[in-house]
Image (spheres, rainbow, N blue to C red):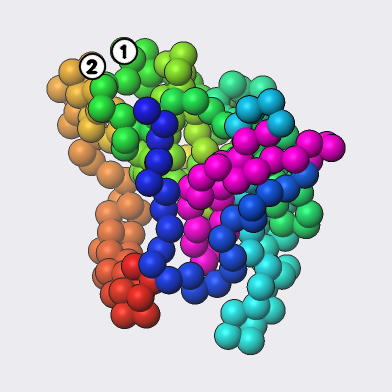
């Protein structure tokens, strides 16, 4: 069973367009098979190529919103996410990057498997050990995933290995010296600490049988800044959801 067969499409599109019906890359034409996600920032679709190969196109919107020009934001966000994929291509833990389409879209290979949210069977015994190793490799490259709390971003590939997708809010700052560089390093360290905590939390959700009592206890103790974020962020999240429901986009 493929993941997200239902897609994630809001009732009302507030900005941008749905995934394009087809695109061409390296002389090959790919046609839309399934809309995977559409939101305020980007549209993502699964496409099929000339010989049946599946790929994913993510297109960041460049249309203005309420008179505000946002073309620069679409291009910047696409550039950032492509950089994140490139940083991790040799780890085997991200989809293979295939190329760019236009100014604000990129293509990566489709990974057969299921995400943790949709998967009915527990992941393999070594899955979270491999996920921890993948996250550690990412951190050694001065990068933080940040979105590890979402189980639908963590895939269990057909061969059992973990694969991460959607690096839209990940962070890989260009670290330099001085006060600004030091501040970036400290902030990066906090984000990386949150990544490690969320891996433990996912393991408790999906394979608690593999954890010691000490590990389970640690997975229930978020860092102080995550506790603060819950206090401040939860009301804002609820307000955002109510606003989306009010305008018919949820």
Kind of element beneath mark 2: helix
- Give the prevailing secondary structure in the magenta stretch: strand
* Residue 210 location, quadrant: top left
The residue positioned 84% from the left and 37% from the top of the image is: 27
* Cα separation between marks 1 and 2: 8 Å
> Does 102 appear above or below 150?
below
Is residue 37 magenta-colored? Answer: yes
Provide the residue span drawn in magenta: 25-49
Q: Which residue is mark 1?
A: 125
Residue 80 can be seen in this image: no
Kind of element beneath mark 1: loop
> Does 89 appear above or below 184?
above
Horizontal side of 206 relative to 78 (left or right) equals left
The quadrant of the image that shows the C terminus is: bottom left
Is residue 209 magenta-colored? Answer: no
Q: Which residue is mark 2?
A: 210
* Residue 141 location, quadrant: top right
As rendered, which of 14 and 185 lies closer to the eye?
A: 14
The residue positioned 53% from the left and 28% from the top of the image is: 111
> Does 193 appear above or below 37?
above
The residue positioned 68% from the left and 68% from the top of the image is: 62
């Amino acid at each position: 069973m493929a993941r997200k067969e239902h897609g994630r499409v809001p009732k009302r599109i507030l900005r941008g367009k749905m995934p394009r019906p087809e695109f061409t890359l390296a002389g090959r034409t790919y046609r839309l098979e399934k809309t995977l996600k559409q939101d305020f920032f980007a549209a993502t679709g699964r496409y099929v190529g000339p010989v049946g190969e599946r790929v994913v196109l993510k297109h960041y919107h460049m249309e203005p919103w309420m008179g505000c020009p946002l073309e620069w934001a679409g291009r910047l966000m696409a550039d950032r996410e492509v950089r994140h994929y490139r940083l991790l291509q040799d780890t085997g833990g991200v989809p293979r990057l295939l190329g760019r389409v236009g100014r604000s879209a990129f293509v990566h290979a489709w990974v057969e498997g299921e995400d943790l949210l949709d998967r009915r069977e527990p992941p393999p015994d070594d899955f979270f050990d491999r996920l921890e190793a993948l996250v550690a490799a990412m951190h050694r490259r001065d990068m933080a995933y940040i979105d590890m709390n979402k189980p639908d971003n963590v895939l269990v590939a057909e061969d059992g290995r973990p694969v991460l997708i959607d690096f839209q809010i990940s962070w890989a700052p260009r670290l330099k010296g001085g006060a600004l560089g030091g501040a970036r390093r400290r902030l990066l360290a906090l984000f990386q600490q949150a990544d490690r905590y969320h891996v433990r939390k996912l393991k408790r959700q999906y394979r608690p049988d593999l954890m010691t009592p000490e590990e389970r206890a640690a997975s229930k103790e978020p860092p102080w800044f995550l506790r603060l974020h819950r206090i401040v962020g939860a009301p804002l999240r609820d307000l955002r959801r109510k606003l989306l429901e009010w305008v018919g986009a949820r």
